Image: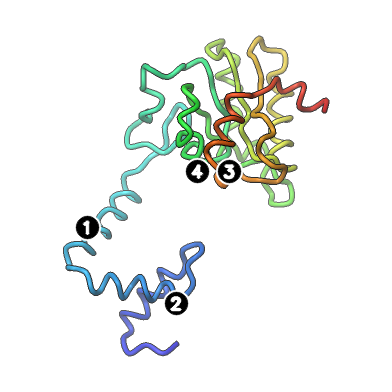
Amino acid sequence: MEFSSKLLQTAVDEVAQLPGIGRRTALRLVLHLMRQPLSQTLHLTSALQAMRENIIFCKNCHNISDSELCEICVNNNRSQDIVCVVEDIRDVMAIESTASFRGVYHVLGGKISPMDGVGPSDLKINTLVDKVRSGRIKELIFALSSTMEGDTTNFYIFKQIQDSKVIISTIARGISVGDELEYADEVTLGRSITNRIPFELSIKS
């Protein structure tokens, strides 16, 4: 694809690096921005810059946040003793969209995957175990994807905390095996949270 402007080509090259965006789509997006008022483009670039420079991770649950504690963790209407364990922030957003869960979260930052070189020490598992051992948690809900890596991560955490008095449950298998949470429809995901089952039953089935 030939460009008459190096500036245009550079912009297209950068946008094309985004997931799911090919060069033709990148070109359409860049040309769209060129047709908009300059102020709109500057607002976009300013918002992106502010996000990259100022966004942080909640020190309690590791979700994205604008301050030390995220809005979910500081919400007094949430059950602080019911913790839903998820892989990443996209899963928090997916579950929140169902409006079926009123507890809080713990974001692991991934799942155990030896093939990808990801071990337990690479995830936020130690802080989760510390929470359980502190006695502040009544129930822990595993809400990782129904994949081999997700099941391995669930089982690893279960072995670390199985002697505690905390209730350990997992979302119901309304989510197809191999599916990622973020792609589940809201109704199915909501029912999976509501109809969660004891984790020990899931590993015996």
Judged from this view, the residue extending furthest toward the front is 187
**Residue 68 relative to residue 128: left or right:** left
Tell which tag, 4 or 3, sits nearer the viewer: 3
Mark on residue 43? 1
Q: Is residue 131 above or below residue 91?
A: above
The local secondary structure at tag 4 comes to: helix
Q: Is residue 62 above or below residue 51?
A: above
Q: Residue at x 56, y 10 (%)?
A: 135
The local secondary structure at tag 1 comes to: helix
Residue that carries the numbered disc 4 in the rendered image: 90
Badge 2 crowding class, 10 Å Cα cut-off, few under 14, some 14 to 19, many 20 or more, is: few
Q: Residue at x 42, y 32 (%)?
A: 58
The kind of residue tagged 3 is Ala
- Marks 2 and 4, the one that precedes in the sequence: 2
Where is residue 23? Give x, y as percent. Answer: 46, 76
Where is residue 159? Give x, y as percent. Answer: 74, 23
The kind of residue tagged 2 is Arg
Q: CA distance from mark 2 to mark 4?
A: 27 Å
Q: Quadrant of the N terminus?
A: bottom left
The kind of residue tagged 1 is His
